[in-house]
Image (cartoon, helix red, strand yellow):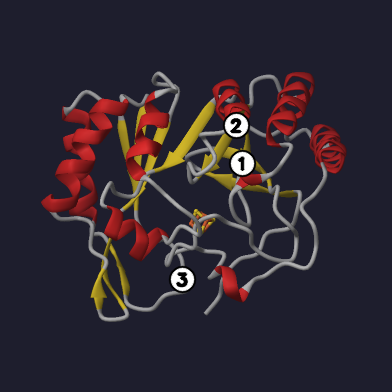
């Protein structure tokens, strides 16, 4: 099975039709994964199989290497369209996440003012005021909410510590619309237990919760790469399109990626 451990603190750029040129910023160690979730679909693999020995990059190292990469891209005449915080786990767990966001916005303004700063997060640290405030300063604050069913979360997202989905949803509302919700839909089973969240029992309550959060956008997607758990299946195009259309009908812009 092939999983991906990204270089740190800078990786890419990756060219995509949807985002353009995306430069990755990985605040996790270069030789393993650190995440407050342990999703059965994680492209980095299971936490236990990728324990790092290296530390997280320092704030200074991130700024220095980001600036060096932007200078290199500037010289090549190909600056990024988006600076994306992602990589080997949860970026907001970095103790200096807020300061790194400020450094990144400063460097973005200096080298590529049209580029967006985008963060992909699992939402587990949004109760920290500094993390909340930093996410308010980025262009795209993309937060994971795969379901609102606690049993499903424990089975699929597998939080390491206490995770209270109701409290997370309340904190999502506190972004006052400056939030993009990202939701993984899939079918199949894991260890003989269904992990299908495409049925009405999951989609209906999730949609009601979205209306209460009132995000600027929703992104629904499905498995795209090999997964560490066996037996998972992609949601179908038809299922994703139907879910997307229900979100749009509720007045919230929504995209579906297959
Ligand atoms: S939240 Fe993201 S990085 Fe963390 S385990 Fe899940 S998919 Fe992997």
Label 3, residues with CA under 10 Å away: few <14, some 14-19, many ≥20:
some
* Residue 126, position as x, y percentages in the image: 52, 35
Lower position in the chain sequence, tag 3 or tag 1: 1
C-beta proximity under 8 Å, tags 3 and 2: no
Q: Nearer the viewer, residue 99 or 184?
A: 99
Q: Position of residue 235 (x, y in %)?
A: 26, 60
Can the viewer see residue 242? no
Image side of residue 153 versus residue 64, left or right: left
Q: In the image, what residue occupies the spot 16% across and 36% down?
A: 246
Q: Label 1 belongs to which residue? A: 92
Element marked by disc 3? loop
For residue 89, above or below residue 15: below
Q: Earlier in the sequence, mark 3 or mark 2?
A: 2
Instruction: Say if mark 2 contacts mark 1, CB within 8 Å.
Output: yes
Residue bearing mark 2: 131
Q: Position of residue 249 (x, y in %)?
A: 16, 28
Q: Please, what secondary structure does the residue beneath circle 1 have?
A: helix
> In the image, 57: left or right of 168?
right
Q: Which residue is mark 3?
A: 226
């Amino acid at each position: 099975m092939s999983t991906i451990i990204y270089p740190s603190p800078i990786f890419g750029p990756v060219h995509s039709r949807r985002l353009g040129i995306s430069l990755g910023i990985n605040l996790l160690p270069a030789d393993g994964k650190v995440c407050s979730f342990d999703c059965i679909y994680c492209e980095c693999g299971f936490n236990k199989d990728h324990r790092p020995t290296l530390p997280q990059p320092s704030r200074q190292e991130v700024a220095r290497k980001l600036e060096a990469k932007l200078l290199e891209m500037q010289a090549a005449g190909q600056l990024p369209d988006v600076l994306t915080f992602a990589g080997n786990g949860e970026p907001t767990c970095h103790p200096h996440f807020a300061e790194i966001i400020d450094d990144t916005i400063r460097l973005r303004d200096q080298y590529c003012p049209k580029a967006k700063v985008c963060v992909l997060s699992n939402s587990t640290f949004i109760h920290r005021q500094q993390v909340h405030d930093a996410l308010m300063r980025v262009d795209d604050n993309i937060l994971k909410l795969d379901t609102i069913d606690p049993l499903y979360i424990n089975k699929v997202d597998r939080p390491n510590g206490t995770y209270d989905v109701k409290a997370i949803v309340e904190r999502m509302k506190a972004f006052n619309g400056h939030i993009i919700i990202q939701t993984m839909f899939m079918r199949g089973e894991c260890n003989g237990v269904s992990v299908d969240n495409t049925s009405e029992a999951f989609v209906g309550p999730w949609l009601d919760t979205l209306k209460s959060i009132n995000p600027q956008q929703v992104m629904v997607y499905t498995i795209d790469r090999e997964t560490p758990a066996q037996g998972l299946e992609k949601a179908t195009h038809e299922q994703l399109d139907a879910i997307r259309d229900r979100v749009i009908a509720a007045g919230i812009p929504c995209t579906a990626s297959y």
